[in-house]
Image (cartoon, helix red, strand yellow):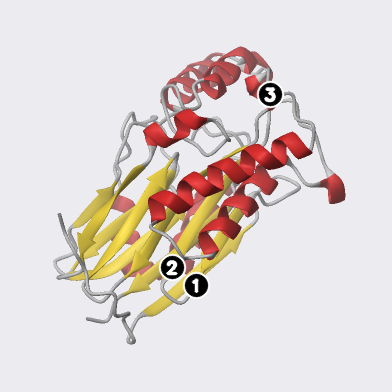
Amino acid sequence: MLHFNTKKLDRMETEHILVQGSSEINEDTLLLGKDIFGVFDGATSLNGTRYSQSRTGGMIASSIACSVFSKNCFPLVELAKGANSAIFEEMLAHGVDLSARESYWSTSAAVVRIHEAGIEWIQTGDSFIILIYNDNSYKVLGELADQDYETLSIWKQEAEQSSFLIHQALKEQIKKTRDGMNRSYGVFNGEKEAEHFLRSGLEYLEDVQEILIFTDGLNIPAEIPERVKNFDTLVELYLSLGLQGLKKHIREIEKEDPACRKYPRFKCHDDIAAISIRPGL
């Protein structure tokens, strides 16, 4: 097991973006602390219920998780459990029908805590952490299959064959995927089973030039859905264009396909929360 000195880096540089997508509300949240950084991507319940100030369940869930992690006073695994429990308590307080899993609020998460020689990290759902090394190679932490692969594969087939409303046609498939929360993929949604899907660890920072943390809105649109995402192009473009340039590149691709038929996805533009960290070792 790796052990790190608790001394913090004082030469670290960071950059971040938080951009709303096509929806009315941005459900992504950023955590920017002195030595703790994270992104959270909320997912609204399928019944579309709004709460005070027109907030969605996804927005509330991502904000709760961010707030708990910002306390930065326990190991990340313990903070993750606390965030999950806090979401459960808030759903109870808002009268969410917990007998219907499509009513649950949820959020993905990717969080790192920086130490002098390494990072402590935790991840669940479709938010990502990538370490980019000095030779431009990279490592995805907590890499797993795309939870939406099956839905987007069907989406691609339907888009090529007809012109009907894809969201309506895939309503049952989307519900099936949502029912897979903490059964086939992990999210914070208040369920105890969420703990089984947490991915966490420690990584040395030796030879690491960049740490990239981001929600799935920063993924480069793909014509063919990938069961396990390939980040070669994303890393290459990030290193050449920077975080803002990468975001601009993605938005330009999406604008060319507003109906989401060439590049299957759930909306023209997804929310984006992203942080880049240069350890400065």
Q: Which of the pair 138/73 is nearer the observer?
A: 73
Reply above or below: 141 against 172. Answer: below
Q: Earlier in the sequence, mark 1 or mark 3?
A: 1
Q: Amino acid at mark 1?
A: Gly
Q: Amino acid at mark 3?
A: Leu
Query: Residue 98 — which label?
Result: 3
Say if mark 2 contacts mark 1, CB within 8 Å. yes
Look at 50% across and 56% down and name the residue there: 39
Query: Residue 33 — which label?
Result: 1
Q: Answer with the quarter of the image where residue 235 lies.
A: bottom left
Query: Residue 36 — which label?
Result: 2
Where is residue 209 shown, x and y percent of the image?
Answer: 24, 71
Say if mark 2 contacts mark 3, CB within 8 Å. no
Q: Amino acid at mark 2?
A: Ile
Density class for disc 2 (Cα within 10 Å; few <14, some 14-19, many ≥20) is many
Residue 215 is at least partly visible in this image: no
Q: CA distance from mark 2 to mark 3?
A: 32 Å
Density class for disc 1 (Cα within 10 Å; few <14, some 14-19, many ≥20) is few
Q: Secondary structure at mark 2?
A: strand
Q: Secondary structure at mark 1?
A: loop
